[in-house]
């Protein structure tokens, strides 16, 4: 059900844009905000029987409310300085804990994400309790299908909804630099993590991945710095990949890990096929791509029958580069299409990378794909969808 947040700040000009953004964004199904700009009305509401999931507000509002003894509700103070400790992933997480501070002025998706995290537990529909992580693999049976574009847009959309997301690029040559305007500052990354793991027992390493994670503001999620030495990726085995996925999942710091693979014949992709709870197969809307995907699925049925059943059960199919007509009618019954992703002519222009992450038509199709994964129908009835209410603003 939608998280119920009480917002208490003096400035109407702060409240109104936030509520308008909730109503027109993907957050309309995730969050309901009741806002107050007058302390006496906020105090009267909090003395009533209705118990929100969290309270976020200016210090004066929150401290006056805490004197009344309702501190069992998670709360956070909006700080104009952004809260203590800077903007590292560790401090962003700390600022979303009950009784902490949240940067008052920051991008609205990030602000709403902090509010959702404050409510506690996973907000992944059909997900689980706090500490559980869903592993989502993104694979293709052929090249040039737009797999990385799909994976990056999924990470951005889920991260923008307040989920704690890790984007893991497992391509031999990491192509994300083509999509992101800025690169992370130089520093150790995935290759250093893999090196450290080699010297540790198989059951060790918990918390180690977080040391090398960096925040991508463009994707609204965490990731590793791109691996510069191709040899390091070529040496990465299925066992290495399986262990890495386990570390990211077992740490409990993420709601979802999105693993973006390279060639499906690589060992890294094999580990993703086995370990993932959800598999997104990205197909190009043409005959060669459909044929190769069918052949790969037939290969698993014939050579690995123990793997084929679970593989199909967790597979979802996305048809990319679709025009006015597409190839869905030619697909076999075991390959139902969950999303038809449109061909975007603007992507042939220079600087297409930035366009690939900011095209409304494509993002809408990605949203439908994410709905198929998160099983939106499992959302419990609660606060009316699209609710962004005010307590005392006309």
Image (cartoon, rainbow, N blue to C red):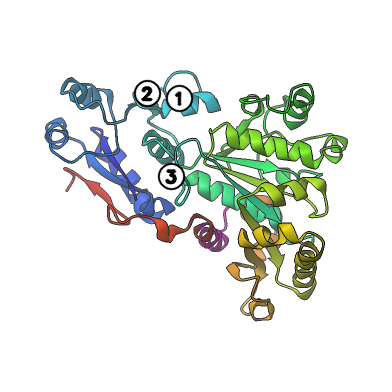
Quadrant of residue 217 within the rendered picture: top right
Residue 99 lies in the magenta-colored region = no
1 and 2 marks in contact (CB < 8 Å): yes
Image coords of residue 142 (percent x, y): 79, 62
Q: Which mark is residue 322?
A: none
Q: Residues within 10 Å of mark 3 (few under 14, many from 20)?
A: many
Q: Residue at x 41, y 57 (%)?
A: 378
Q: Is residue 154 left or right of residue 1?
A: right
Badge 2: residue crowd in 10 Å (few <14, some 14–19, many ≥20): some
Estimate the x, y position of residue 185 in percent, counting from the top left.
Answer: 68, 28
* Front of the two marks 2 and 3: 3
Position of residue 50 relative to residue 184, above or below, is below
Q: Secondary structure at mark 2?
A: strand
Residues at marks 1 and 2, CA–CA distance in whole angstroms: 7 Å
Determine whether 68 is above or below 6 in the image.
above
* SS majority, magenta: helix
- Give the labeled residue for mark 1: 94
Q: Which residue is mark 2?
A: 100
Give me the residue at 72% from left, 24% from top: 187
Q: Residues within 10 Å of mark 1 (few under 14, many from 20)?
A: some
Let me know if residue 351 appears in the view.
Answer: no
Spatial CA distance of label 3 from label 1 is 18 Å
N-term mark: 1 or 2:
1
Which residue extends farthest front?
306
Q: Is residue 364 above or below residue 162?
A: below
Sequence order check, earlier mark of 3 and 1: 1
Q: Which residues are magenta?
A: 357-370
Report the Cα–Cα distance between label 2 and label 3.
Answer: 20 Å
- Identify which residue, 55 or 200, lies in the foreground: 200
Residue position marked by numbered label 3 in the rendering: 123
> SS of the residue at dot 3?
loop
What's the residue at 37%, 30% (across, down)? 104
């Amino acid at each position: 059900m939608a998280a119920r947040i009480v917002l208490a700040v003096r400035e109407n000009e702060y409240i109104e844009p936030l509520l308008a953004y909730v109503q027109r964004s993907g957050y309309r199904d995730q969050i309901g905000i009741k806002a107050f700009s007058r302390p006496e009305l906020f105090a009267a509401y909090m003395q009533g029987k209705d118990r929100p999931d969290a309270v976020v507000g200016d210090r004066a509002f929150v401290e006056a409310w805490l004197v009344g003894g309702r501190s069992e509700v998670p709360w956070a103070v909006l700080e104009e300085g952004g809260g203590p400790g800077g903007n590292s992933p560790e401090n962003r997480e700390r600022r979303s804990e009950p009784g902490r501070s949240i940067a008052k002025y920051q991008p609205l998706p990030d602000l709403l994400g902090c509010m959702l995290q404050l409510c506690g537990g996973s907000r992944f529909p059909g997900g689980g309790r706090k500490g559980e992580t869903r592993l989502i693999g993104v694979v293709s049976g052929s090249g040039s299908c737009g797999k990385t574009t799909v994976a990056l847009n999924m990470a951005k959309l889920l991260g923008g909804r307040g989920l704690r997301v890790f984007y893991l690029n497992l391509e031999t040559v990491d192509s994300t630099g083509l999509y992101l305007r800025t690169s992370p500052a130089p520093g150790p990354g995935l290759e250093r993590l893999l090196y450290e793991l080699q010297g540790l027992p198989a059951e060790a390493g918990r918390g180690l991945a977080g040391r090398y994670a960096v925040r991508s503001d463009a994707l609204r999620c965490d990731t590793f710095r791109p691996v510069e030495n191709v040899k390091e990726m070529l040496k990465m085995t299925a066992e290495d990949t399986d262990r890495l996925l386990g570390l990211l999942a077992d740490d409990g710091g993420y709601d979802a890990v999105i693993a973006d693979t390279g060639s499906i014949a690589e060992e890294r992709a094999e580990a993703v096929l086995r370990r993932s709870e959800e598999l997104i197969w990205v197909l190009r809307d043409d005959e060669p791509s459909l044929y190769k995907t069918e052949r790969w699925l037939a290969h698993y049925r014939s050579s690995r029958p123990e793997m084929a059943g679970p593989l199909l059960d967790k597979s979802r199919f996305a048809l990319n580069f679709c025009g006015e007509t597409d190839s869905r009618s030619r697909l076999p019954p075991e390959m139902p299409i969950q999303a038809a992703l449109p061909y975007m002519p603007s992507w042939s222009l220079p600087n297409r990378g930035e366009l690939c992450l900011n095209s409304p038509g494509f993002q809408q199709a990605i949203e439908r794909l994410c709905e198929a994964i998160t099983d939106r129908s499992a959302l419990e009835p609660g606060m009316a969808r699209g609710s962004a209410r005010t307590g005392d603003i006309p």
